[in-house]
Image (cartoon, helix red, strand yellow):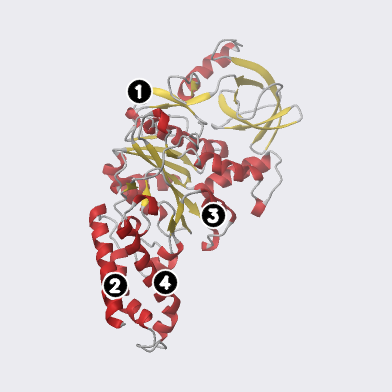
Amino acid sequence: MSETKFRGLDLSSLLQMRTEQLSRRDVHKGSHSFRSLGKVKRVIGDMIEASAPNISIGSFAQINGCLCEVVGFQEKTALIMALDILKQVRQGDSVLYLNNPVSIPVGSAFLGRVIDPLGRPIDGLPAPIAQGHRPLYGQAPNPMKRAKIEHALESGVRVIDGMLTLGQGQRIAIMAGSGVGKSTLMGVLARNSDADVNVIALVGERGREVREFIDNDLQEEGLRRSVVVVSTSDVSPAMQIKGVFAAMSVAEHFRDQGKKVLVMTDSLTRLAMAQRQIGLSAGEPPATKGYPPSVFTLLPRLLERGGCGEEADGSSGSITTVSTVLIEADDINDPIGDTVRSIVDGHIVLSRRLVGFGHYPPVDVLQSLSRTMPMTVNEEHLESAVRVRRILAVYEENEELIRLGAYKRGSDPDVDLAISLKPEIDQFLRQDRGDSQTFADTQSQINGLSEKIKSRSRTRK
């Protein structure tokens, strides 16, 4: 939905208007009207129960100047969760419901800025001047009109460009346990990729880590072409969810301008945890590992908004999404990891074991996959990646015997070849955090490795 067709109410404007409206207790019937429909009945934890006929889930409300959201119903009672800090609430307080859908301000002035999920700046600078507004919950492109993924997105990371090439419009997940380097890899992608715009959603982050990520990982060159949407761990679960959807709305604005957009979310696991907290508070039954069914509905609704735009729009824009997944006990088959992997177009697994060896980036190539790589690289590159992957698989299968000295050279030509080439392959897969390499150079190197594999295979036979 374009900005010109959407006539919602800007969240930032709403926050400026609400104090005056509440003080007057006006009930308007205009296009940006409020209706006083309910009273607070009781509060349980973070959930507010209020009387509320004729409203829908997702409606926005105000209680004592605090912006809230309707997250569920129980008979004629609305279940409401605050988006801002609700300092005071009493039984019988008025609840004002917002008629119109709520939008997020967008525009090129937001590049280089750090904002909250409501579009308000948190970097100490004046509010950016918006060029338009996007609905917070946009529609995914029509699957029959969506453009195909045909071109590679250069990441500047050798192991990704060479072995797990990303396509423009691809959705991929970075899966790893805590402390393995997900945020660091995101920062490298933001600085080195050939995307026109980065949109970064930091969900449930520690307040300390936000500044560290921007200064140390993203750095000035990455921030210059980025919009960073921050919802730290101390804000409400509803606000954390809004942060991810707001980031996607900002990305859709730039995609419709024909730009290559890279959306990075850290992390989908915290998003799922926020939705779990809301769902359980609203009375949903817990399912797999305590996650209610709404979690598994939310993830595809968000991720499907990424990808290439519709061909009918006449723009060549795309949204490539890179989302981190914090997996429990380094098990990529945990419920969130398994669900995300079934939705996206590939996954990059980071290995704690490789971190222990000082191998950066710690990408476990054999556990990782890019489903769009065959569509975006030439046949020679694809064959080279398959040959290198095969050598890695042979070495890993026999690694224990090799390290124990139990393998006798000459017993298996494939194992001998893997042992001789492993140092060169590791050198190709390693890369310093500050380094960047062009896609053409990466292709040349992996094709060179492939030629060595072929020539040495012929020699050994």
Left or right: where 96 falls relative to 200: right
Q: Nearer the viewer, mark 1 or mark 2?
A: 2
- Tell me the amino acid under the disc marked 1: Ile
Q: Does residue 160 sit above or below 300 in this rendering? A: below
Picture disc at residue 129: 1
Cα–Cα span, label 3 and label 4: 23 Å
Going from N to C along the chain, the mark reached first, 3 or 2, is: 3
Going from N to C along the chain, the mark reached first, 2 or 4, is: 4
| Quarter holding residue 426 | bottom left
Q: Nearer the viewer, mark 2 or mark 4?
A: 2
* Picture residue at 66% right of the left edge, 39% below the top: 45
Q: Nearer the viewer, mark 1 or mark 3?
A: 3
Residue 374 placement (x, y as % from top left):
39, 54
Residue identifier under label 2: 454
Going from N to C along the chain, the mark reached first, 1 or 2, is: 1
Going from N to C along the chain, the mark reached first, 3 or 4, is: 3
Residue identifier under label 3: 337
Q: Nearer the viewer, mark 3 or mark 4?
A: 4
Residue 5 placement (x, y as % from top left):
46, 19
Residue 178 placement (x, y as % from top left):
47, 58
